[in-house]
Image (cartoon, rainbow, N blue to C red):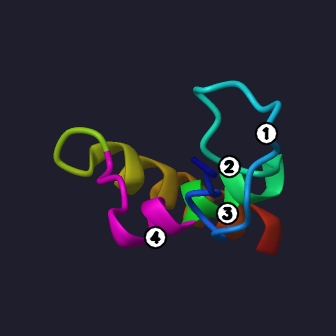
Amino acid sequence: MERHCTHCGEPLDEAAPAHRHYCTDACRQAAYRTRIAKNPVPASGSGGTALWVMALGVGLLMLARR
């Protein structure tokens, strides 16, 4: 039975281990990026971290303009 890459559908090498799902690291990484784009990870907590980082960025921008 021939196995295929989960991302692109190319046939996997017959010598590939049974746990292999992707033909190359590039396909593995592309599949990960596709999954993340479909299900973005929310900011931790109630968004406090994201707000803190944004406030820090604004503060640094204000300092740079002085």
Q: Which mark is residue 62?
A: none
Q: Which mark is residue 37?
A: 4
**CB under 8 Å between callouts 3 and 2?**
no
Residue 42 painted magenta: yes
Q: Position of residue 63 (x, y in %)?
A: 73, 61
Q: Nearer the viewer, mark 1 or mark 2?
A: 1
For disc 1, the marked residue is 14
The amino acid beneath tag 2 is Tyr
**Mark 3 Cα shell of 10 Å, populated few (<14), some (14-19), many (≥20):** some
Q: Would you identify the image quadrant in which residue 15 lies?
A: top right
Residue furthest front in the image: 1
Q: Nearer the viewer, mark 3 or mark 1?
A: 1
SS of the residue at dot 2?
Answer: loop
Q: Earlier in the sequence, mark 3 or mark 2?
A: 2
Q: 45 or 20, which lies in front?
A: 20
The amino acid beneath tag 1 is Glu
For disc 2, the marked residue is 22
SS of the residue at dot 3?
Answer: helix
Real-space Cα separation, disc 4 to disc 3, in angstroms: 11 Å
Q: Position of residue 3 (x, y in %)?
A: 61, 50
For disc 3, the marked residue is 30
Residue 5 painted magenta: no
Q: Where 17 falls versus 61 (above or below)?
A: above
- Is residue 17 left or right of 14 when viewed as pictured? left
Indicate the quadrant containing the C terminus: top left, top right, bottom left or bottom right: bottom right
